[in-house]
Image (spheres, rainbow, N blue to C red):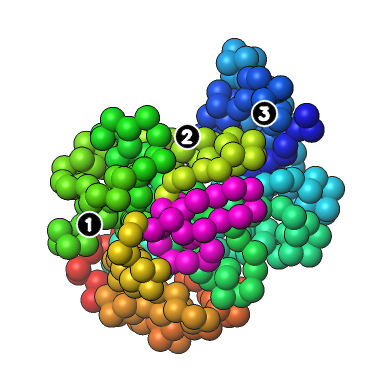
Amino acid sequence: MTARHVAIVGSGSFGRAICHSLAALAPRDTAARPPLRVTVLARDGAAAAEVARACRVRAAVSGTAVEFAGETLSDEVDALRRLRPDALVCCASAQSPYERVTAPSAWTSLIEQAGFGLTLPLQASIAARLARAVAEVSPGTLLVNGCFPDAVNPLLAALGLPVHCGIGNVATLAACLQASLGLPDQGGLAVLGHHAQLAAPGDPAGEVRAWHDGTPVAGVTELLAADRALPRTELNAIGGHAAARLLADLLSDMEVHTSLPGPLGLPGGYPVRLAGAAIALDLPAGLTTEAAIDWNTRAGRRDGVEVSGDRVGYPDRAAAALAPHLPDVAAGWPADALDEVGDQLTALRQRLRRAQPVAVGSAR
């Protein structure tokens, strides 16, 4: 069988987690499933080569039919024209979610005040470049986005750019629920959830919704409590493992039933059915697409951003935090201003990183 090819962009913790799990989850029996090739692409070619080398060892120990290579990513279009992978996975962004822990500053205090959605243009910049490259030279490649897909994917869709689905977030929550419920797979599990719900909501009405075989799952907060208490790095690794399972199955031409963020460029996360390039929502009976989108849109306001049509807006809390710094941005902006707004946020970040962090609530 011809090997299927996935390219992972990014050598950070999420990209590494996916690669580590692909080394163990890739097919063993190539008579039943095609072998797998993985190319790790990163600005730091040495880091990409390091990930590939470690994963080759893992694959050897696991006895899986997967090859790993690492390359420097200097130009997205050139890389896509040459590689033409079956799937391209974006695990790189211009803003680390861990900065508030590793390098707290007035910038990370602003994110805490406004919500993670403040960083949307920085989360979207690399994904948008990859999507443009796919559209230009490799339209058969499925773009899978792992950088804040709950809001980035709708933004890409508003720009008319191709994006197949996201990974992480609701997929992580679905994996945790699968384990808590003792289910062998996610075939009968449907989860409606948003990135904002990786942490328990203050209002029980804002909790993740789940169904098993069409019946609502009770006690979701309790079922997720122990998983939500894990260090975020552990949840990140769980999300990477779930993503690897998805990619291994998807590239083996299997039909997959799971829950993913940003399918079809929609906000938030939904139960879906995938088979190669075909993807469709797989909502439980009685839940309309419109109601599911509305629910996710409302849930996403906890993150401090909303993508509606071709415009990005901010709920009151986020707008009030951002307005003293960038009042025009705080008022909302059209999707096609992504690059310009990203430049403004980058300049603001550079300035605020030089200032000490501020206790949330004291800066207004």
Structural crowding at the residue carrying mark 3, measured as other residues with C-alpha within 10 Å and reported as few (<14), some (14–19) or many (≥20):
many
The span from disc 3 to disc 1 (Cα, nearest Å) is 38 Å
The stretch of residues the image draws in magenta is 260-283
Q: Is residue 271 magenta?
A: yes
Q: Amino acid at mark 1?
A: Glu
Query: Would residue 116 appear left or right of 1 to someone viewing this image?
Result: left
Q: Amino acid at mark 2?
A: His
At numbered mark 3, what does the secondary structure look like: helix, strand or loop? loop
**CB-based contact (under 8 Å), mark 2 and mark 3:** no
Residue 241: mark in rendering = 2
Q: Amino acid at mark 3?
A: Arg
The span from disc 2 to disc 1 (Cα, nearest Å) is 24 Å
Sequence-first disc among 2 and 3: 3
Where in the figure is residue 132, as x and y percent of width and height? 71, 65
Residue 33: mark in rendering = 3
Query: Would residue 239 appear left or right of 247 to someone viewing this image?
Result: left
Where in the figure is residue 316, as x and y percent of width and height? 28, 80
Structural crowding at the residue carrying mark 2, measured as other residues with C-alpha within 10 Å and reported as few (<14), some (14–19) or many (≥20):
many
Residue 265 vs residue 285, the one in the foreground: 285
Considering only vertical position in the picture, is 85 above or below 135? above
The span from disc 2 to disc 3 (Cα, nearest Å) is 19 Å
Where in the figure is residue 364, as x and y percent of width and height? 23, 76
Residue 256 vs residue 312, the one in the foreground: 256
Q: Is residue 151 magenta?
A: no
The residue under the point 31% across, 45% down is: 213
At numbered mark 2, what does the secondary structure look like: helix, strand or loop? helix
Residue 212 vs residue 131, the one in the foreground: 212
Sequence-first disc among 2 and 1: 1
Sequence-first disc among 3 and 1: 3
- Label 1, on which residue? 207
Residue 193 seen by the camera: yes
